[in-house]
Image (spheres, helix red, strand yellow):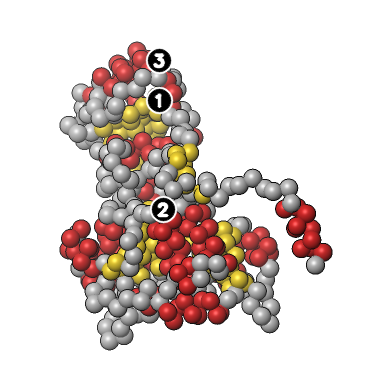
Amino acid sequence: MSNQAKPISSPEEVVGVGAPLAELEGGFAEPAAARARPIPRISIQAFCENGATAEIIQIAAEDRRLAKAHVSVHMGGVEAAVTHYQQNPTPNLIIIECGLPRDHLLAELDRLAENCDPGTKVLIVGQANDVMLYRELLKRGVSEYLVEPVAPLQLMEAVSNLYNNPETEPVGHVYAFIGAKGGVGSSTICHNASWSLSEILKVDVVIADLDLAFGTTGLDFNQDPMQGIADALSSPDRLDEVLLDRLLTKCSEHLSIFAAPVVLDRDYDISVEGCDRVIDVVRQNVPYVAVDLPHTWTPWVKSVLLQADEVIITAAPDLANLRNAKNIVDLLQQTRRNDSKPRLVMNMVNMPKRPEISVKEFESAIGLKAISVIDFDSETFGQAANNGQMIEELSAKARSAAAFRDIALAMSNRRDTQAVKKSSGLVPFLEKLKLKR
């Protein structure tokens, strides 16, 4: 067993205490709690004493962050682990649930250590919130100790920290944008929200356009790059920081695009592994990656949706969009039980002479509240698209410009602390006047 854990000084550090909101530059705030990072290709074997803990570990094992790990769950606690490893090699990580008294637990761990291979890490799930016990476990080479009850995310974060340096900056956040139906403006939402995010937070953002044949990222940013994402996908194993920098096209101080080739004289055969590899390399180099997905259904599109940190669904208020959006939401909630719900953006609402499903009915049917409702505005959006501009660049006073700012803040789990102002006493009165009119 190897000793990788850091000593603690108080019982609160054993169980973990949620951090308050941390203030950011520019008047923005975000939750300071750490995120569980993707866990490498390791083998994990768990030995539990009760079914509830075994179920928690199984839920964690099915999470996207452990997609590369091989996890097996056994019953019997530390005694079963000792017996098992007397005849079998140890995995990369052993998780043991143990409610034994302190001295008995330590004695069993001493027996376990006799059969542990070098480099094997051990994580204990126990009942005692005892700093002295924790320190004794550290002396014996135990890597981490968690106090029951343990939630799936807490367990994943603990395992992640054993194989990723918690002191380093986290890997970039991946946002997957997809339309509930073709032509609903998912790419427009993706491009404008990403641009707003880069301008508001002053952090680097990369837009990856995976609609290789018909993508509009180059047009929307008035760029015509010679190289782009197709070059990376054709040889994903060659992609590194140097090649990535060469293939990206810089559009502003903080925004770059991984443009699609948009030519039809070649076929595009994207593999799940190749797509994952390209996105992983990008997220290692920038804080935010926005993936603009085409409206199609392939194994790699499904993989991107399931592996993304956040999913943003754009929909128009009609029946086909409602059906498709519900199908996407149901799939994500079934397979991403430890992640936040997808975000819904209602676009092209209040189109003249078009019968529509009300936003309230749409939200109720799919079980999501829209983070933004954008009215149909063909003049503003059409002019911005033809000019190769973002909406806010064309007209900072447009209602949709404020909407994209709200989307950017919502999807990044931030809030504008400078925007919170005390309401004037005249506001209710003015609102009443508007209603009377």
Circle on res. 13: 1
Residue 312 shows in this picture: yes
Q: Quadrant of residue 300?
A: bottom left
User: Whole-Å distance between the Cαs marked 3 and 1?
Assistant: 21 Å
Element assignment for label 1: helix
Q: Residue furthest top?
A: 103
Q: Nearer the viewer, residue 238 or 403?
A: 403
Q: Quadrant of residue 264?
A: bottom left
Which amino acid type is marked by label 3?
Answer: Pro
Q: Position of residue 29 (x, y in %)?
A: 47, 44
Q: Residue under label 3, please give it.
A: 101
For image coordinates 31% across by 55% down, the residue present is 286
Q: Residue under label 2, please give it.
A: 201
Earlier in the chain: of badge 3 and badge 1, it is: 1
Residue 73 shows in this picture: no
| Quadrant, the N terminus | top left
